[in-house]
Amino acid sequence: MIQFSQISHQYLNGHLVHALEKINLTIQSGQFIALIGPSGCGKSTLLRLAANLIQPTQGQIQIHGESPQQAVLNKRIAWMAQQPALLPWLSVQKNIELALKFQKKPSSIQKQTEQALQAVRLTEAAHQFPNTLSGGMQQRLALARLLVQDADIWLMDEPFAALDELTRENLTIELYNLWSSYQPTVLWVTHNIYEAVKLSDRILVFSPPPGRIVGDININLSQPRQENSPEFQKLLNQLRNILHQDQELHQ
Amino acid sequence: MKNQTIHKKQGDLTAWLIVLVFFILWEFIVRINNTPVYLLPAPSRVISTMIAFPLTYAQASFITIGEALAGLCLGVMAGILIASLLTLLPGLEDGVMTLAILIKSTPLVAIAPLLTLWLGFGIFPKIIITALLTFFPVLVNILSGMTRIDPALHDLFRSWNASRWEIYRHLRLPSAIPYLFTALKIAAPLSLIGAVVAEWTGASGGLGRTMWLAYTNLNLPFMFAAIFILAAAGISIYRLISWAEKHFVFWSQNSILD
């Protein structure tokens, strides 16, 4: 379980930016959560706080009863950003192996690497270098690296935003399949409400800055979800209404 | 890729043609004007001097290029070590960089005679002078490479709870490799200058010493022959570094993107 209690965050960027304001949130283990909202609403900030990359100005975060720092130390968290963040001087295989070395489990590095590459269909590219891979393959490699970390929580900050629509759609399905197999808790920042409804158990809608949660929707539709079904469309409209209403309120 | 190779070959050919035209013009002007040899010898005269004394030039080149490369290695090692130290202990940066700028700003011609006075006419002071001249561009470039790392990669390592040393070893050090080659391209020609200037202040051998002796005797063909060899050595070392860069920094070449 992840618990955010009274989380506020401010930072200096030429002027004082109020990124998040009094966020109270409980996330159950094994849920696939989508975080949506306008640009600069603090979605990514919330993820960075959970990953212990930044510290909150106010409030407390508990991850399975531990602080984010302790959770990172105990290898509970795996991080994936918009850029695949691959080491260009290492081959596909070595990129995975390095992630495994940091897990301090040196025993089955080769086997785990093979399994992860197989899971993301990159076995044939194992000895290639990242600069020879397409954008989609680079993100699949980043996904494989996420898998080998064997973490309970996947923090994903718009991981497929820089890709073309078709590649993004395919990778989103792959991500969902991987989540189904591994059952981690996923916090997934996205701008795409359609993808959010298609995959998530729960959608958190953020207001324009300072970010507050203005919508918290549980999705009880069974998978695979039919995009043309009235329930799917109803959820899409509900999300659009929340986003537009809040935007108008801020304007 | 094929187009790039063709463009590169065309570029090389153009460069050699410009050099050739320059030498032909030089030869032509000297011959037409009957320029005295003690003012400007024709290139053909310089080359025939070089051919007449092959052993003298081979020995002198061996000494100078040896000093330059040894000094370059020392300068590169010092630059990498200091940059690493400043990356791992950023609090030291202001103090150490001030000292480095002080060394860099002190004129080489002022230090060189002092080192020769203290350390003698052997190769040791030449290596030290060359190292002093070359370590600064290496330090500045490597420090940039180690500090300007990809923020996304830094976040990733922090999410792995990597220590400062682990981030240095797996991220900062490899990230600095392209910067090292940039530094080497600047420092390698400087190393030849350093070795020659050091030899001018007193040496028992080397191209700098040869040039100095030729200059004092107004034997300009002898002096220009040494200059030609230094220029050829400079170009060769630069080319060698560029070749090595292509092989070792393969990831910053062309990438395939969607």
Image (cartoon, helix red, strand yellow):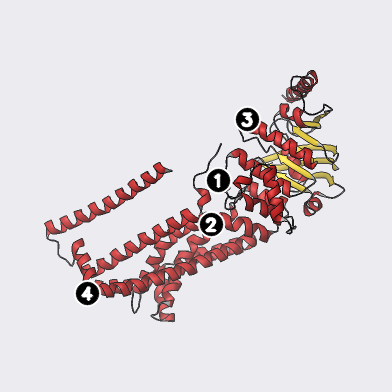
Query: Residue B55, how many percent across, how many down?
Result: 28, 75
Secondary structure of residue under mark 4: loop
Q: Earlier in the sequence, mark 2 or mark 4?
A: 2
- Residue under circle 1? A131
Q: Residues within 10 Å of mark 4 (few under 14, many from 20)?
A: few
- Residue under circle 3? A166
Q: Are marks 3 and 2 on the same chain?
A: no
| C-alpha distance separating marks 2 and 4 | 46 Å
Q: Residues within 10 Å of mark 3 (few under 14, many from 20)?
A: few
Between A114 and A231, the one lying in front of the other is A114
- Residue under circle 4? B217
- Residue under circle 2? B177
Q: Are marks 4 and 3 on the same chain?
A: no
Secondary structure of residue under mark 2: helix
Between B144 and B47, the one lying in front of the other is B47
Q: Nearer the viewer, mark 4 or mark 3?
A: 3
Which amino acid is tagged 1? Asn
| C-alpha distance separating marks 4 and 1 | 58 Å
Q: Residues within 10 Å of mark 2 (few under 14, many from 20)?
A: some
| C-alpha distance separating marks 4 and 3 | 77 Å
Q: Nearer the viewer, mark 3 or mark 2?
A: 3
Residue at 84% over, 28% down: A220
Which amino acid is tagged 3? Leu
| C-alpha distance separating marks 3 and 1 | 21 Å
Q: Earlier in the sequence, mark 3 or mark 1?
A: 1
Which amino acid is tagged 4? Asn
